[in-house]
Amino acid sequence: MANQYTGGKWNVYDEQIKEILELNKGIEPIDVVKQISNDFDTLQRQEFSRYIRRNITRICDVNEGIYNACEDIKVDFTSAKNLWIKTKNKDGGGVSGFIVNPNYVAPVEEDKIAKEIDFLSIFKDRVLPVIIENREDYCSDTVFDRLVYTDVHIGMEVNPDGYSLYGGVWNEEEIFIRLRIMIAHTIKFKKSNILHIDELGDFVDGWDGETTRKGHKLPQNMDNQGMYDVGVRFKIELIEGLVNHFDKIICHNICEDNHAGSFGYIINSAFKTYIELKYPTNVEVINQRKFIDHYFATPVHCFPLTHGKDSKSLKFGFKPILDKAQENKIDNYIKEYFILQKDVKIEFCKGDSHQYITDNSTSKSFSYNNFPAFSPPSGWVQVNFQNSISGFVHYNYYDNSQKSINDHIF
């Protein structure tokens, strides 16, 4: 069986790697990369370093038994902290042994990094508050407006080799072209002085060229730093473009998903600190860290939000078409939090599927809403599924519990 971690473009360096490791005991993989060549860019250095770390036992023939045991059960040998080996003979005897894996590599603690960044201390003396006067009330029966977008996938490469099935471009320029269209659309269809903005996850494409669960390589056109800069700027420009048109803007950002994860939380945390300091009475930011959470826009309008997949545990996410198992899971959440009350309308909202599907009839308790991706489909999606639509959805909600839908398809 071929080793799943060998990576064809890096194994040509195996002999050089082995020689450097034997001559420099304890050397870090990133320093091995530097000794081999200084011509790699940031993403290539990170990828090559991971390759060395994951293949060090194979290259140097160290701890081969541990390596083979993990390979037999298709587990990355650097992710298994300990192993328990048990064998049994026909006569009832056998061997049992507990092994500490010396090749274990602790995962990057992005949550810890996020907690250690004190954005308030960075921004508080550099951001002057801006107070925007309230506008005259609309002579309208609209109680609030709502903007929903999801799956921006900043940094995603949709046409890595120039031969993806439907092509396309998804770079910084295209991202901001679409952002300005969304701002103009929201202003055009404004019917209230209150705006809820729901961003449903996968805001950036990944960390170090992988999803939050690792092991899934992603073709990307930005490094981590580039995605961070574009992400924070995107969020700030969205508010700057809208804040003079609304008395109150409330942002709900999902930070528990399968692409952005803790990286998405770090971006949204910086955004929250900055924008709430600048517009202390006009803008509120809520960064959702639960897989499912909800808010009431009014006493009779409730919105449970989820990305659809989480960062670690969920094997299968919420599907685009509601089935009985998913309906039961959502019903259980609604009962647990006592959401289902007389006259309350519940709109369950998710991203992830990159499909625009609304189901108002399967469940009597809630509507089930899939939202289109803000980004175009990746090369992988183009081949495995189809050339899906992309866009965002804007709503006006009225005091008679009705709503108008003002969607935009790119």
Image (cartoon, grey):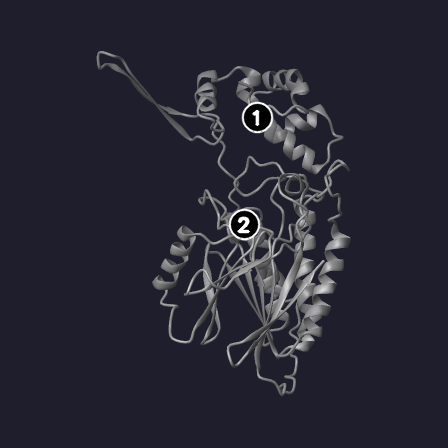
Q: Nearer the viewer, mark 2 or mark 1?
A: 1
For the view shown, which residue lies furthest in the front direction? 361
Check disc 1: other Cα within 10 Å, few if <14, some if 14-19, many if 20+: some
x and y, in percent, of residue 276 in the image: 59, 69
- Rendered residue at 74%/52% (across/down): 172
Check disc 2: other Cα within 10 Å, few if <14, some if 14-19, many if 20+: many
- Disc 2: which residue: 262
Q: Nearer the viewer, residue 112 or 8?
A: 8
Whether residue 232 sits left or right of residue 57 in the image: it is right
- Disc nearer the start of the sequence (2/1): 1
Q: Give the structural element (helix, strand or loop) at label 2.
A: helix
- Rendered residue at 53%/50% (across/down): 257
Quadrant assignment, res 293: bottom left
x and y, in percent, of residue 131 in the image: 64, 79
Q: Nearer the viewer, residue 155 or 276?
A: 155
The amino acid beneath tag 2 is Ser
- Look at the picture and state if 127 lies above or below 64: below
x and y, in percent, of residue 17 in the image: 64, 20
